[in-house]
């Protein structure tokens, strides 16, 4: 069984993405790793090359900055990375620049890939998510945060990244997946307020035009942690991936948010639906970019 990792990245230093941690968190599971490196204005390439692994292959690309609708440029770059995977790879493991996998899940992930290798009906593996917010000590747990996403797919070139690279489709249909008991740790919202202000400005330029940006995210924009309204934050009592420990040790800000009042901002409808999910585990009207196969 051959496994290829793949990702895309641009300006990881400027935007403070933990790209090295993301790559190295799954590198032990991969026989090769394709990094599509966009046109950077910082030292991202040196950062990635500093991993110093013979498994890593860097492909330099230029982003089409004219694509400013729905984050479609992210899917375009993801597809470039997927296309560069060796034809003899069986599985392709996708990781984004602000995601990590805890090493404790490696044996299970490897076993799931091996166990499902010859089952053609399983076209991908679906991961659960922990979305950390504002701090490494809390994660968002509400309907505002997606619960699951595909991160391993078969090396079938008919598969392509969907919309803004959050999921995959095979031709134009949803992929058949198996839900596995492993988590992706998402750290995109763990930054100080100034970092999150930069994140919103840099991220949204690939979704909106200049007029929208000037009205909604001017240079004077400042971020506070209630801006996103995470609804509910849960204290994280577990451990973070080993690759994240240096970043966590270097944390120099505190989460400034009134945790007790978050729930008060939820509408009655959201509170009711959240209560149903808490009791039954069923997320009513959940968007699913996949089809779960029961095994």
Image: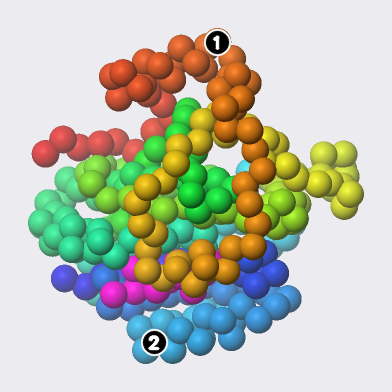
Residue 25 % position (x, y):
37, 68
Q: Position of residue 63 (x, y in %)?
A: 66, 66
Vertical side of 264 occupied by 40: above or below: below
Report the predominant secondary structure element of the magenta stretch.
Answer: helix
Left or right position of 260 against 151: right
Image height check: is 244 above or below 196? below
* Front residue of this view, candidates 264 and 159: 264
Residue 161 % position (x, y):
46, 52
Q: Residue at point 27% right, 51% down?
A: 182
Of 101 and 126, the residue lying toward us: 101
Residue that appears at 28% across and 19% down? 280
**Residue 263 seen in this snapshot:** yes
Element type where label 1 sits in the image: helix
What crowding class fits label 1: few (fewer than 14 Cα within 10 Å), some (14-19), or many (20 or more)? few
Answer yes or no: do the residues labelled 2 and 1 have beta carbons within 8 Å?
no
Could you say where residue 207 lies in the image, as x and y percent from the top left?
69, 46
* Image quarter of the C terminus: top left
Q: On the image, numbered disc 2 is attached to which residue?
A: 53
Q: Local crowd at mark 2 within 10 Å, few (<14), some, or many (≥20)?
A: few
**Residue at 29% across, 36% down:** 291
| Colour pattern of the rendering | rainbow
Residue 226 falls left or right of residue 248: right
Could you tell me if residue 146 is visible in this image? no
Q: Which residues are magenta?
A: 17-28
In the rendered image, residue 82 lying in the magenta stretch gets the answer no
Find disc 1 in the rendering and name its residue.
Answer: 268
Quadrant location of residue 55? bottom left
Question: The N terminus lies in which quarter of the figure?
Answer: bottom left
């Amino acid at each position: 069984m051959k496994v290829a990792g793949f990702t895309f990245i641009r300006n990881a230093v400027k935007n403070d993405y933990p790209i090295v941690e993301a790559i190295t968190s799954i590198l032990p599971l991969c026989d090769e790793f394709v990094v599509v490196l966009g046109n950077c204005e910082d030292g991202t390439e040196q950062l990635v090359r500093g991993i110093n692994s013979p498994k890593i292959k860097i492909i330099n690309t230029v982003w089409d900055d004219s694509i400013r609708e729905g984050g479609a440029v992210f899917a375009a770059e993801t597809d470039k990375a997927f296309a560069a995977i060796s034809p003899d790879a069986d599985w392709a493991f996708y990781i984004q620049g602000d995601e990590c996998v805890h090493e404790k899940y490696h044996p299970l992930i490897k076993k799931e890939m091996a166990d499902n290798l010859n089952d053609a009906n399983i076209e991908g593996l679906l991961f659960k998510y922990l979305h950390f917010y504002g701090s490494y000590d809390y994660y968002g747990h509400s309907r505002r945060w997606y619960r699951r996403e595909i991160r391993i797919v078969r090396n079938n070139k008919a598969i392509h990244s969907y919309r803004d690279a959050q999921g995959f489709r095979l031709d134009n249909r949803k992929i058949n997946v198996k839900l596995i008991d492993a988590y992706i740790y998402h750290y995109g919202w763990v930054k100080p307020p100034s970092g999150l202000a930069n994140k919103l400005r840099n991220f949204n330029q690939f979704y909106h035009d200049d007029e929208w940006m000037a009205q909604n995210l001017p240079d004077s924009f400042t971020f506070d942690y209630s801006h996103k309204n995470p609804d509910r934050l849960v204290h994280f009592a577990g451990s973070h991936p080993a690759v994240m420990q240096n970043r966590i040790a270097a944390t120099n800000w505190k989460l400034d948010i009134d945790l007790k009042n978050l729930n008060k901002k939820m509408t009655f409808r959201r509170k009711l639906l959240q209560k149903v999910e808490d009791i039954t585990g069923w997320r009513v009207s959940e968007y699913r970019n996949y089809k779960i196969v029961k095994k």
